[in-house]
Amino acid sequence: MNYFNLKLIYNYLSILLVFSLLLSTFNFTFAQTSPPIEPLTPHHLGSSFRGLQVANDQSIWVSGSKGVVGISTNGGLSWKWQQVPGYEKRDFRDIAAFDSANAIIMAVAEPAVILKTSNGGQSWQLVFSDTTPGMFLDAMHFINPTNGIVVGDPINGKAFIAYTIDGGEHWNRFSDSVEQNRLSLDSGEAFFASSGANIQLMNSNKPFEFFMVSGGQHSRLIGVGFPFNQNIPFSSLGTTKGANALAMKNKKKGVIVGGDFSNDQSAFQTCWLVNTTSSNPFRQPLQPTFGYRSSVIWVNNKLLLACGTSGIDISADEGNHWKNISTSGFHVAATHKKSKWIFLAGSNGRLARIPKSLLF
């Protein structure tokens, strides 16, 4: 082979190598691109939002401190705000909403109250109030517009549980003598009112089938209506540590997030994968979330999103591996199967949304 041919081959191989490197770099860059997080108009009073509900593809409700409630009827593009009259100093830590007209809000501490609107927030009806010393409501969950449940910190050593079977018009304290034994909490064990997501109803026809997670000096996953009550194996617990939120896919499988609120960038024991039928029901992911997380949701059958004060993570394999997509902090995330968006809410009145189509 002559020199001329060798030179041609060399030049060809050099060009091919450069092209391959460029292509590889492009693919790497593309793979690392995170979906856009679109900031929405924040509330001017700077409320801390921990209540968030996506009722359908257009109606989104949010609630928080300073008595603030907001509603959007156009997918988050614009918001109608109010401070609920007479409750301007209350903290509405959770909200349940069913459409643009009907919603229920929960204020945490003494007196613990639940309010309901059926006219889009034009007026609110007091449907529950409790002045018991030490009363502090933490979270609320409705499995449909009829059946809902609320959990509060322990009173006389037992978790406070109340339920409704008429859309929140009336609330009844859970008092089944057998199941009440499951609600006994240890000293220093309570619930974090961080995102309204530490209790979840599991059966639309039975208000007594639910899971809840506790934290503090002890952290457990407790199943009521079916036998499950086990410690989550945190190696270190304390007043700012433990489980914050759960997202059960069904009675057997789910995801729990939490960690240490006071050290929110630590990824140590921030996520647990749950299998209630296993002899070892709690397993840590192969790649954990990238810090403390206060909210976790199923976007679809495989995809999860978690958020907390130090960032937002997603998982495409049911929680086994997590990828950080933002270091912007939010308290709570929510979506609806008909919505094209995932919505987030946090401190200083901040709101945002992420398009589902660009997650993976």
Image (spheres, rainbow, N blue to C red):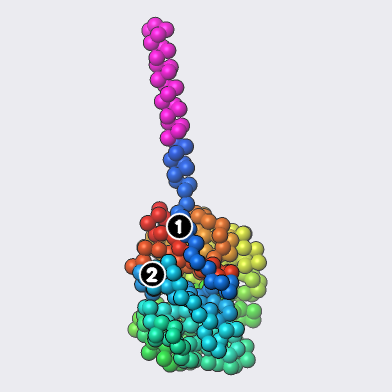
Q: How many C-alpha atoms fall within 10 Å of the one at disc 2: few (<14), some, or many (≥20)? A: few
| Three-letter amino acid code at the position of disc 1 | Ser
Residue 325: x %, y % from top left: 50, 55
Q: Which residue is mark 1?
A: 315
Location of residue 275 with respect to 34 vertically, above or below: below
Residue at (56%, 60%) from the top-left corner?
328
Location of residue 26 with respect to 253 vertically, above or below: above
Residue at (44%, 60%) from the top-left corner?
354
**What secondary structure predominates along the stretch shown in magenta?**
helix
Q: Are marks 1 and 2 in contact (CB under 8 Å)?
A: no
Compare residues 271 and 299 and report the one nearer the observer.
299
Q: Which residue is mark 2?
A: 74
Residue 263: x %, y % from top left: 65, 63
Q: Please identify the quarter of the rendering in which residue 45 is found.
A: bottom right
Compare residues 345 and 112 and report the one nearer the observer.
345
| Three-letter amino acid code at the position of disc 2 | Asn
**Magenta segment:** 1-23
Residue 287: x %, y % from top left: 52, 54
